[in-house]
Amino acid sequence: MVLGAEGGDGTGYEPSGRDAAMDAALAALYGSGRGDGGRRRSGERSAGLGASAPSVARWLGDIRTYFPGSVVQVMQRDAIDRLGLSSLLLEPEMLEAVEPDVHLVGTLLSLNKAMPETTKETARAVVRKVVGQLEKKLATRTRATLTGALDRSARISRPRHRDIDWDRTIRANLKNYLPEYRTVVPERLIGYGRAAQSAKKEVVLCIDQSGSMAASVVYASVFGAVLASMRSIATRLVVFDTAVVDLTDQLDDPVDVLFGTQLGGGTDINRALAYCQSKITRPADTVVVLISDLYEGGIRDEMLKRVAAMKAAGVQFVALLALSDEGAPAYDREHAAALAALGAPAFACTPDLFPEVMAAAIEKRPLPVP
């Protein structure tokens, strides 16, 4: 509460004006917190969110007026969890009032199949706003980091004359500088690989769409769209629960990708990896990123054999327990340990770290495990 009522906190002060409005907004969600167990005297303003979209929409407007954005997002999530307001997210007027964030997008995606047509366009607008914000934040650094990694991985030690990287060659041979001739004798040439007509690397994003992975699905879809926009990377995006869906042809629009997912259901990692494995044509130039909490409902031993087979063929295999800012995730520790034993450590990754993880995989160097 913002301020206690008379006798509530010993101040004898009854909030009014802006303080009273903030107090009411908090009480509607968290209860009054007063010594009378939340009951109010006759004539006092009432608290609580009625089971209707208009009252919730008004409350959403109030909290956006009186609290900073970070607090608003926490209160929205608490309202959905504590008061069971998921069904009201199907109302257009409520969606128009809500403060969009990754968690709200996850909730909307989980309700996608139940969403009436009158709400779908509003929901897509909310999702598109969040996706746009994420792309703006993540795209530039991702492209720069991976372009550098691709260039480094393409350098060759015996280049043709026209492919020599003279700047790096000179720096690598400064110890061979001959003062009398004012020149460097290059013992080792460094060059760029000739640009191929096809992509230099292939990336397969294999995303668990079980309900607990909602935020990861959002971030992975945005990163998938960013990777797909790079001509030097051929990107495939696969989502799975007990079924497998290839959404690669929708990667030009991450909003379409997100609405192509179906959060919830079981998990069959083995089936998903079998599909991804069947699409690999250049193992030595392929990075497979499995994003899953590893709670496998399929055949565990076959799943591990597939990972081992891909790694033996030269695939760079990355296992992310989560791709989000939500902190330490819940995951199957036994399966994570089994992957680590195969040389594929499983770890949670923040969106900020993801470009570095991908760069390390592309260059075939140790992953920056947090």
Image (cartoon, rainbow, N blue to C red):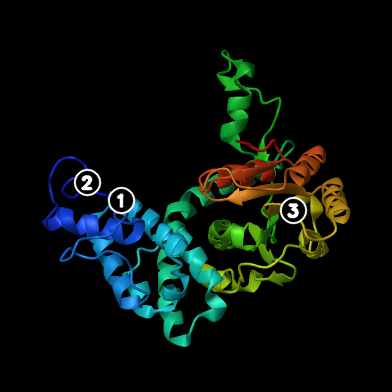
Identify the amino acid type marked 1: Gly
Q: Are marks 1 and 2 in contact (CB under 8 Å)?
A: yes
- Toward the viewer: 79 or 322? 79
Q: Label 1's element?
A: loop
Q: Is residue 183 above or below residue 103?
A: above
Q: Quadrant of the C terminus?
A: top right
Identify the amino acid type marked 2: Gly
Q: Is residue 200 visible?
A: no
| Foreground disc of the pair 3, 1 | 1
Q: Which residue is mark 3?
A: 286
Identify the amino acid type marked 3: Thr
Q: Label 3's element?
A: strand
Q: CA distance from mark 3 to mark 1?
A: 57 Å
Name the mark on residue 108: none
Question: Does label 1 or label 2 sit earlier along the sequence?
Answer: 2
The part of the image, by quadrant, that contains residue 38 is: bottom left
Q: Is residue 72 left or right of residue 271?
A: left
Q: CA distance from mark 1 to mark 2?
A: 9 Å
Q: Which residue is mark 2?
A: 8
The residue lying at 53 percent from left, 73 percent from top is 111
- Toward the viewer: 350 or 201? 350
Q: Is residue 53 left or right of residue 123?
A: left
Other-residue count near label 3 (Cα within 10 Å), few / some / many at <14 / 14–19 / ≥20? many
Name the mark on residue 33: 1
